[in-house]
Amino acid sequence: LSGLIGVDGLFVLADDVGDGTTLVADADQLANFDFQNGPDSIVLRLGEVIVDALGYGVFGVDDVFAGEGNAATDPSAGSSLARHFADLDSNDNALDFGALEVPTPGSALVVVPEPATAVLLLTGLGGLARIGRHRSEF
């Protein structure tokens, strides 16, 4: 990969249809690849370091799974896989990814509040409640 990740934190790598164009709007980079309907694996590396990995589909004994944890579901042709929460990686593809009927390149599927945000919010509210209780005892 080459280029810069935008302020939205997303980078869209799209398949070159063979003539230097793509069917994906606003792609950051084009490459020649052909992901198959599973089983398959996609590994993102920075040099030799694995940054993230996705394995999807049903792997047989002779297939090589290069994802994390358990394989994500095998989406039907024309659909895509998306991470449930943009900033949460449990290192288990089956938990982290789900199928989307309509692909959404360049946008992150965000559920508000995301789990990390909800924990911080609840921790803060709990702390405020304790402070309020101690003040009423004075």
Image (cartoon, rainbow, N blue to C red):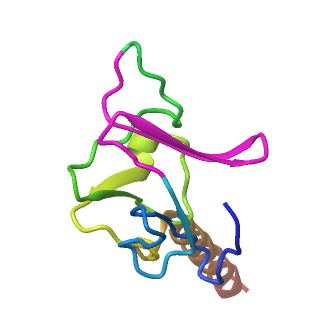
Does residue 63 sit above or below 32 in this rendering? above
Q: Which residues are magenta?
A: 33-60
- Residues 106 and 87: in front is 106
Where is residue 136 drawn, in percent x and y?
64, 86
Q: Position of residue 5 (x, y in %)?
A: 67, 74
Horizontally, is 81 left or right of 64 in the view?
left
Q: Position of residue 65 (x, y in %)?
A: 48, 28
**The furthest residue to the front:** 19
**Is 33 rendered above or below residue 66?**
below
What residue is rendered at 21% in x and 52% in y? 77
Please name whichever residue, 3 or 127, is drawn nearer the observer in this view of the structure: 3
Q: Judge whether 31 appears above or below 136 on screen.
A: above
- Rendered image quadrant of residue 95: top left
**Closer-to-camera residue (112/63):** 63
Q: Report the number of numbered marks.
A: 0
Q: Residue furthest top?
A: 61
Location of the C terminus by quadrant is bottom right
Q: Quadrant of residue 79?
A: bottom left
